[in-house]
């Protein structure tokens, strides 16, 4: 009891010190913080709201109106045998790989709230139904950063493959604990009009939460960009912290496949967005983080293979643009990624064996 009390005091003191440091940083780097926040607002207005809001409204409407059950019936056996999930998750999987990062989690929460699927089933689905959408990968990374749509398409295909493989692995890891919701479950059904109103309302609340996180993290990223001098450290920190800033920084320092890893990982800002839209679905955050690392590595691997197929060897390792001649082997980065992968696999195996 004494040790536990001291630990809580130490944690509180450490948190208080961190808050004081953050406040001081906000005062010293107020301009950089404001510029970062403004950049986050621009990202919300120009990218996130146009690309995410329609998908969030559609996913919510699909569940509330009962259409998810109807659309999922043809894929019932596939969803159950491959992913260990109910048929209603079939359209949710499609929406998650086409809509963007938080769409899958938001949809899983909708299925849970409406009684279409059980708690554990929704938790398992939310672990792997995380994917950057075409708007981010093709338009933002492919066209805006590399000025090459093909690179964005390669990353999108790599992301989809990583989601499918992670979902299959998730089913294998959870073997013996798979529970598919029975057909007679108590489900909440709304009329089409009520479903539409509720869907738009829920999507609005979800977008407000997501945009708030993006603006807050972008403000801090603006400070970090100024404070950190070392190129590699700066790239690594920003990539872990916020995905939009991370991919822009990584594209000028690292090869294409490394940028794909950043997009596949998603960044802590995206992770917080997902936690917020999951609502009462409380998942193991450490396991979720490990899944994101594994998904990032798979995305990087498939992007690497895709670049070898559609581009020459020099382009695979080029920095900034595909046509560039500079070469960055990424040996240190590769070592860090491989080490992280091994740690994640060991942790996941140990955790599920203990359960």
Image: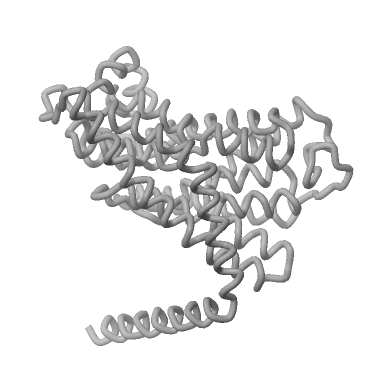
In-image side of 113 versus 262 (left or right): left
Q: In what quadrant of the picture does the N terminus appear?
A: bottom left
Q: Tell me if I can see residue 76 in this picture.
A: no
* Residue 48 image offset from top left, x and y in percent: 49, 43
What count of labels does the image hold? Answer: 0
Q: Tell me if I can see residue 96 in this picture.
A: yes
Would you place residue 85 above or below residue 112 in this image?
above
List the single residue furthest toward the top: 74
Would you place residue 41 above or below residue 197 in this image?
below
Q: In which quarter of the image is residue 173?
A: top left
Q: In which quarter of the image is residue 189?
A: top left
* Residue 19 image offset from top left, x and y in percent: 43, 79
In-image side of 352 versus 140 (left or right): left
Q: In which quarter of the image is residue 304?
A: top right
In-image side of 231 versus 326 (left or right): left
* Residue 190 image offset from top left, x and y in percent: 15, 27
| Residue at 68% over, 65% down | 233
| Residue at 72% over, 71% down | 229
| Residue at 18% over, 29% down | 194
Colour theme: one colour
Would you place residue 83 above or below residue 22 in this image?
above
* Residue in the foreground of this view, choosing between 14 and 141: 141
| Residue at 32% over, 23% down | 80
């Amino acid at each position: 009891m004494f040790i536990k009390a001291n630990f809580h005091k130490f944690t509180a003191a450490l948190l208080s010190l961190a808050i004081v440091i953050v406040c001081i940083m906000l005062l010293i780097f107020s301009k950089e913080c404001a510029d970062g926040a403004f950049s986050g607002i621009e990202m919300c207005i120009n990218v996130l709201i146009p690309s995410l809001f329609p998908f969030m409204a559609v996913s919510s409407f699909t569940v509330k109106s009962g259409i998810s059950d109807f659309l999922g019936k043809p894929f019932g056996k596939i969803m159950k045998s491959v992913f260990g999930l109910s048929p209603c998750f079939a359209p949710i999987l499609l929406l998650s790989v086409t809509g963007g990062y938080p769409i899958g989690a938001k949809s899983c929460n909708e299925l849970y709230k409406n009684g279409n699927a059980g708690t554990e089933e929704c938790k398992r689905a939310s672990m792997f139904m995380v994917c950057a959408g075409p708007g981010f990968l093709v338009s933002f990374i492919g066209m805006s950063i590399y000025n090459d749509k093909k690179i964005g398409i390669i990353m999108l295909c790599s992301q989809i493959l990583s989601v499918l493989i992670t979902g299959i692995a998730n089913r294998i890891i959870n073997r013996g604990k798979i529970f598919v919701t029975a057909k007679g479950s108590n489900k909440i059904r709304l009329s089409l009009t009520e479903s539409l109103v509720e869907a738009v309302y829920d999507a609005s609340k979800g977008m407000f939460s997501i945009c708030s996180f993006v603006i807050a993290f972008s403000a801090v990223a603006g400070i970090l960009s100024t404070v950190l001098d070392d190129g590699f450290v700066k790239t690594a920190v920003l990539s872990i912290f916020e995905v939009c800033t991370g991919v822009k920084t990584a594209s000028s320092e690292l090869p294409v496949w490394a940028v794909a890893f950043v997009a596949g990982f998603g960044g802590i800002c995206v992770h917080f967005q997902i936690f917020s839209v999951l609502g009462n679905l409380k998942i193991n955050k450490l396991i979720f983080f490990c899944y994101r690392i594994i998904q990032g590595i798979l995305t990087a691997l498939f992007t690497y293979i895709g670049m070898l197929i559609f581009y020459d060897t020099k382009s695979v390792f080029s920095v900034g643009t595909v046509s560039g001649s500079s070469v960055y082997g990424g040996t240190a980065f590769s070592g860090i990624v491989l080490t992280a992968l091994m740690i994640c696999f060991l942790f996941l195996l140990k955790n599920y064996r203990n359960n």
